[in-house]
Amino acid sequence: MFDTAVIIETVVKAVIVVAVIAALAGFATFIERKVLAFMQRRLGPMHVGPYGLLQLAADGIKLFTKEDIIPQNAIKPIFMIAPVIAATTAFVAMAAVPYFPEFTLFGYTIHPIISDINVALLYVMGVASVGIYGPLLAGMSSANKWSLLGAARAVVQMLSFEVVSGLSVLAPIMMIGSLSLIDINDAQTGGIGDWLIWKQPLAFVLFAIAGFMETNRAPFDTVEFEAEIVAGYATEYSGMRWGLFFIGEYANMITISVLVSIIFMGGYNAFWFIPGGLMMLLKVSFWIFLFLWVRAAWPHVRPDQLMWVCWKVLMPLSVVNIVITGFALL
Amino acid sequence: MELKDFKRRDVGSAYIFLKTEATPTDGWQAFKRFVKRTLKGELFVGLWIVLREMIRFDIHTLQYPLEKIEMGPRYRAIHRLLRLFESGSERCIGCGLCEKICISNCIRMDTHVDEKSRKVVSEYSINFGRCIFCGYCAEVCPELAIVHGAEYENAGEQRAHFGLKEDMLTPLDTFKAKQQKEFQGFGALSANADENVKQTPLAY
């Protein structure tokens, strides 16, 4: 059975992951505002602290001290629990994700993963899909038509991209023969030529597109697109409940970035003279930057275009990819 | 050209038609268009453009309360009453033309005859809540006494915000420090006008 040391270690790791990722999610909002501003030849937040760095603190204070308004006709318990679902599922999904290579601290070997389960990838994708209940319940309980439309779009979008992300990631799994993210990482130890992106370029592109859909990011942000449905499912939310949705979204972005880095881009293997941990940070940073970059550059698609591209283009492509991979493996 | 030439509606070949893509009529053409659009790389052009702007870092933000834009001489903001450069006395001779021409009826002046039997302006006020900054008063002034300044930050607590004579008249210490700027006249170019000359958009 579990001994005390393992329990303590797991709890400490969980607390560290939640604290660091929540802080990073907050910081990512600042980075997003800055990057978008620079790409649009603006300066972004500049007044709070040096180069606007303390904007984070100002936003945090504002979110925490704002009145928690619950609309009159909203279904109160569901309305209150929905943002918690969105944030917790985003963090729970991180339990099976390894971040760095294992290292030794005070003579004690630390695996920077909360739990190395053998169905890690399935678990992460499953929990991340449960996260759709946040927008769904929020939209349905808000007694607001924009919210309801946002919830409907969230479900439509999830049904569409889940098929693509599941099928596209099947081909790498077939090649490696394991769902554990550590095994997937260890299969790419031989430098940049061993990265799965070269063997599965199509799966990589499909999984990346599905990742953008899963995080409701720019070209596929139909769920909360301001110009069409105000703020979508989050229209009626204010203060920290809205903040939880926000943290969940950014935590999801980090999870997707880590997943893409591990599955397709060599994970936390050392590269040339760069140690594995730094390599992982670089890759995740690049992916977060890509999320912001794409948001600055590309227009967004309509929900019907999203479904069209998912069911008629991406899903057939991923099936073809699986068939080709199967034949190649034979 | 006669009038009937201008009234001719059938321009016919005078139109220049843009070469647009033909609408696909069958599935194969639609598929070809889809493949072409997918592989055209337009999305990456968009990515490159925003990245280029980020690297170039040519920021156009003006951090307003700290930095301010320099207003051109044609800008019509809060009025100023100028003094004569030689004597420092007020230029205004109290002719009342500005009061007369003001289309929003917001200028009011009081004059009297002083001990040297000269006409002096004792009160001069502009209701800035009503002024539309049309510039007629400055245009009609025979002495270049009332001109428009560049002071555009004129938010007030009251709807009827009056500018009195002492607010608009160049203060004596400013005048003595030779800080009073002469009004360049209507249609004057700004000091950096040469730098702002650009080719017409079609040329570049």
Image (spheres, rainbow, N blue to C red):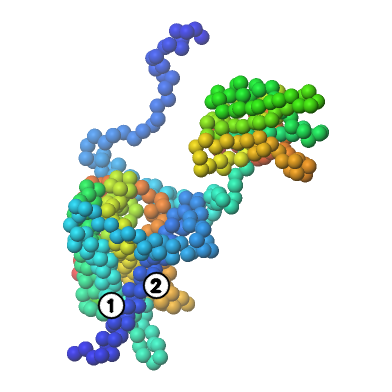
Q: Chain of mark 1?
A: A
Residue, disc 2: A280
Vertical arrangement, residue B149 with respect to residue A171, above or below: above
Residue, disc 1: A183
Vertical arrangement, residue B158 with respect to residue A91, above or below: above
Q: Quadrant of residue B192?
A: top right
Q: Nearer the viewer, mark 2 or mark 1?
A: 2
Q: Type of residue at label 2?
A: Met
Front one among B201 and B24: B201
Please tell me which of labels 2 and 1 falls first in the chain. 1
Q: Quadrant of residue A259?
A: bottom left
How far from the left and from the top, in percent, is residue A329?
22, 69
How far from the left and from the top, in percent, is residue A308?
22, 48
Residue name at image x 19 percent, y 52 percent:
A73
Q: Are marks 2 and 1 on the same chain?
A: yes
Q: Type of residue at label 1?
A: Asp
In what element is the residue under mark 2? helix
Q: Quadrant of residue A284?
A: bottom left
Quarter of the image containing the C terminus of chain A? bottom left
How far from the left and from the top, in percent, is residue A153?
22, 51
